[in-house]
């Protein structure tokens, strides 16, 4: 919970990691990719305020104590959602697996929500594994990374028949929140890797599922906006938007926020820190204080009220994940235009 | 004798297709050697995992640009610090083409379709920039709908917009309408406002992406922050 000027904010961090990118976890012969990946993350890390920088060694692998303190003592977070990222082509035990996240999620069940994952290229066996994982952990959501390398393949599409079978399984199991992350490399390499049209296709085919597009489809914000405005079940995941732009590029951050508020609206935007890329503390503080800079460039963007900020920083995610919000932190009337699909599993 | 300035000038004509800015302005050119008609160029990108298709286009375009300079007979362009540096450098310098550089990983023979997608985005964005300026100068959207290219005073924005029209093979004669779609079709008066609203989002996306990439390049190579420098 964050309090400022007499207003109280319920804080749900929609995207956190508990990763191990230390050299001991690098696969022999793949070290350059494992190292390149975490260095790439470290570049993003340095777009935040300097007082929050970590040394590389800590950034590669951090402790339970660090994470608990950063999120729940210093970072104002009431509930954090784990989104696993496997990358088992480069990391022996994976970069940030369900099992790794479950260590904390099972120890602190009131603090974390644990999301699952699947990769349609794993076929029948993967589908059974997803079912077993769900039986054990009771997922309300999954994180999908379409740019993951897998044997010879460099990515997959939500449009594929294999992906459809997995999404049907999500519907059947009541795993309603589908977090989709687009990355830079996908087959075929000569096409645009960040194309979000497959999300559009899946969102239309599966109206009972919510699709949260992580990083709002960056760098294809316009394609994301044009799609999200037409699909009632597509949401904007704001990780990276706040972390990478709010501090380092405030004017562009304001324009991107203005576009998102115009096309997608405050009921369908979900904040996330993307911890440990960035610390949640400065993001929460700065966002609550945020307003457009002076200038006619920003004049016709929709304004964002305190109520809107409360939705984005926690209440929207609470709705998607059926998180109970203490009475004094709710909005007076919680009506909304967004057609959220409530999870059927509690 | 060919000077470095001539080669740099040629390289300034190479754009990042996604960011719509010259690779020289983006500080992607990290090294240049000119010696007896032979040129070596080193390029760098904001991250190790930048999309290899756009990276390939920039390396290939840089090589072509350098070879267009009179007196240059040989050019070697090297992409540094990228996960696919090896494939891209060999692919471009030995002229295997993109599909030759990444066998089994492409679906059609080249990158022209991808390039066209981003040329259209660039066109839309540049048109919006020009129209925004014209609106700020007290023209109405209806005025814009009626204007032809001959009505627009010369400016850097107009120059860039005309370049993008030429790239798409669109009419750039004085009588051609100002506000057209990427196929060259005139936007009707009652649709201009909506057309420019979409176009603005395209422009914000390209500019925001460019700023993100500048930020990442700056942290990666410890280049002083641009916003700070100009503040």
Image (cartoon, coloured by chain):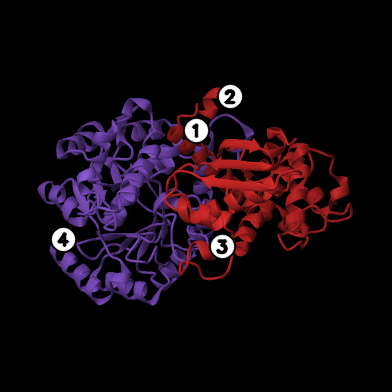
Disc 1 or 4, which lies upstream in sequence?
4
Q: CA distance from mark 1 to mark 3?
A: 43 Å
Q: Colour of chain B?
A: red
Q: Is residue A186 above or below residue A162?
A: above
Label 3 marks a residue whose chain is B
Q: CA distance from mark 3 to mark 2?
A: 42 Å
Q: Quadrant of residue A8?
A: top left
Question: Does mark 3 fall on the same chain as mark 1?
Answer: no
Label 2 neighbourhood size at 10 Å, few (<14), some (14-19), many (20+)? few
The image's mark for residue A137 is: 4
Residue A240: image x %, image y %? 40, 43
Label 2 marks a residue whose chain is B
Residue B70: image x %, image y %? 76, 44
Q: Read off the residue under disc 3.
A: B96
Question: Does mark 4 fall on the same chain as mark 1?
Answer: yes
Q: Read off the residue under disc 1.
A: A250
Label 3 neighbourhood size at 10 Å, few (<14), some (14-19), many (20+)? some
Label 1 neighbourhood size at 10 Å, few (<14), some (14-19), many (20+)? some
> Mark 3: which secondary structure?
loop
Q: Nearer the viewer, mark 3 or mark 4?
A: 3
Q: Read off the residue under disc 2.
A: B230
Nearer to the camera, A9 or A332: A9
Residue A222 in sight from this viewpoint: no
Residue B202 in sight from this viewpoint: yes
């Amino acid at each position: 919970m964050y309090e400022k000027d007499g207003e109280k904010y319920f804080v749900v961090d929609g995207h956190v990691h508990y990763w191990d990118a230390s050299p001991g976890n690098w696969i022999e012969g793949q070290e350059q990719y494992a190292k390149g990946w975490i260095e790439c993350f470290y570049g993003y890390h340095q777009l935040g305020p300097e007082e929050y920088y970590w040394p590389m060694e800590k950034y590669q692998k951090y402790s339970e104590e660090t994470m608990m303190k950063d999120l729940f003592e210093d970072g104002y977070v009431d509930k954090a959602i784990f989104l696993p990222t496997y990358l088992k082509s480069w990391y022996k035990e994976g970069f940030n697996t369900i099992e790794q996240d479950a260590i904390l999620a099972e120890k602190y069940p009131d603090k974390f929500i644990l999301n699952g994952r699947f990769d349609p290229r794993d076929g029948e066996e993967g589908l059974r594994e997803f079912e077993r994982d769900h039986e054990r952990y009771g997922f309300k959501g999954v994180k999908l990374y379409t740019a993951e390398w897998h044997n010879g393949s460099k990515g997959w599409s939500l449009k594929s028949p294999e992906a459809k079978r997995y999404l049907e399984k999500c519907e059947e199991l009541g795993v309603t929140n589908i977090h989709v992350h687009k990355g830079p490399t996908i087959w075929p390499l000569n096409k645009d890797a960040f194309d979000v049209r497959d999300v559009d296709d899946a969102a239309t085919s599966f109206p009972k599922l919510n699709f949260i597009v992580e990083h709002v489809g960056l760098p294809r914000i316009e394609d994301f906006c044009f799609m999200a405005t037409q699909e009632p079940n597509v949401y904007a995941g704001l990780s990276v938007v706040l972390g990478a732009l709010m501090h380092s590029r405030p004017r562009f951050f304001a324009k991107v926020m203005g576009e998102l508020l115009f096309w997608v609206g405050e009921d369908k935007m979900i904040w996330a820190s993307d911890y440990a890329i960035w610390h949640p503390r400065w993001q929460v503080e700065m966002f609550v204080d945020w307003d457009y800079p002076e200038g006619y460039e920003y004049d016709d963007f929709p304004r964002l009220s305190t109520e809107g900020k409360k939705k984005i920083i926690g209440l929207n995610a609470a709705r998607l994940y059926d998180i109970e919000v203490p009475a004094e932190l709710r909005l007076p009337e919680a009506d909304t235009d967004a057609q959220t699909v409530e999870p059927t599993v509690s | 004798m060919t000077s470095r300035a001539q080669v740099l000038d040629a390289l300034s004509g190479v754009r990042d297709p996604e960011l719509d800015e010259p690779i020289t302005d983006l500080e992607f050119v990290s090294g240049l050697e000119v010696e007896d008609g032979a040129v070596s160029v080193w390029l760098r990108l904001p991250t190790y995992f930048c999309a290899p298709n756009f990276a390939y286009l920039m390396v290939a375009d840089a090589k072509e640009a350098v070879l267009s300079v009179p007196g240059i007979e040989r050019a070697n362009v090297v992409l540094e610090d990228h996960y696919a540096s090896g494939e891209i450098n060999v692919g471009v310098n030995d002229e295997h083409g993109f599909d030759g550089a990444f066998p089994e990983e492409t679906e059609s023979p080249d990158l022209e379709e991808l390039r066209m997608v981003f040329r259209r985005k660039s066109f839309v964005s540049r048109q919006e920039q020009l129209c925004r300026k014209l609106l700020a100068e007290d023209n109405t959207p209806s005025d814009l709908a009626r204007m032809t290219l001959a009505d627009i005073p010369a400016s850097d924005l107009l120059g860039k917009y005309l370049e993008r029209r030429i790239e798409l093979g669109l009419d750039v004669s004085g009588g051609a309408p100002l506000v057209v779609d990427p196929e060259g079709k005139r936007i009707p008066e009652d649709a201009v406002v909506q057309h420019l609203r979409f176009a603005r989002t395209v422009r914000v996306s390209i500019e925001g992406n460019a700023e993100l990439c500048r930020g990442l390049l700056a942290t990666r190579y410890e280049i002083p922050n641009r916003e700070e420098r100009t503040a």
